[in-house]
Image (tube, grey):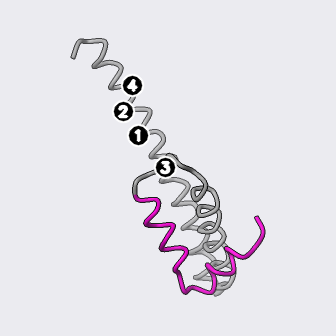
Amino acid sequence: MNDQQIAESGKDAKAALKVIGTQERAVAVMSCAALTWIEAGNIDQAKKFLGRNIADYYRTYQKMEDAAPDRDKFLKRVESSTSPTIKAALAEKP
């Protein structure tokens, strides 16, 4: 690797870490909201929120051809879920 390639790979790594950080922040924000509702006794609100997020992911990534390798495994898990919350969220119109 020459100096320019090393510099470019460093930029790529920083960009990837920024994306990962953004994704982790989104998960933390959603988790915080759900946990706050659970601790306040609003279990149904937390379940609906979590179910909706699962259904949104399912609807979005089920249609993508070029997705993460473990995507199909998770989509099948969602499809075979016995959770009434997940089933209801999937049945709702987006």
The residue wearing badge 3 is: 67
Give the mark, 4 or 3, whose residue is nearer the N terminus.
Answer: 4
Q: Is residue 36 above or below residue 7?
A: below
Image coordinates for residue 37, horizontal then vertical, percent:
63, 78
Q: Nearer the viewer, residue 69 or 49?
A: 69
Q: Main secondary structure of the magenta part?
A: helix
Q: Residue furthest front?
A: 65
Image marks 3 and 1: residues in contact by CB distance under 8 Å? no
The boundaries of the magenta stretch are 70-94
Identify the residue shown where x is 68% and y is 75%: 89
Image marks 2 and 1: residues in contact by CB distance under 8 Å? yes
Residue 17 tag number: 1
Q: Secondary structure at mark 2?
A: helix
Name which residue type carries label 1.
Leu
Q: Residue furthest top?
A: 3
Image coordinates for residue 2, horizontal then vertical, percent:
23, 12
Residue 11 tag number: 4
Q: CA distance from mark 4 to mark 1?
A: 10 Å
* Mark 4 neighbour class, 10 Å CA radius: few under 14, some 14 to 19, many 20 or more: few
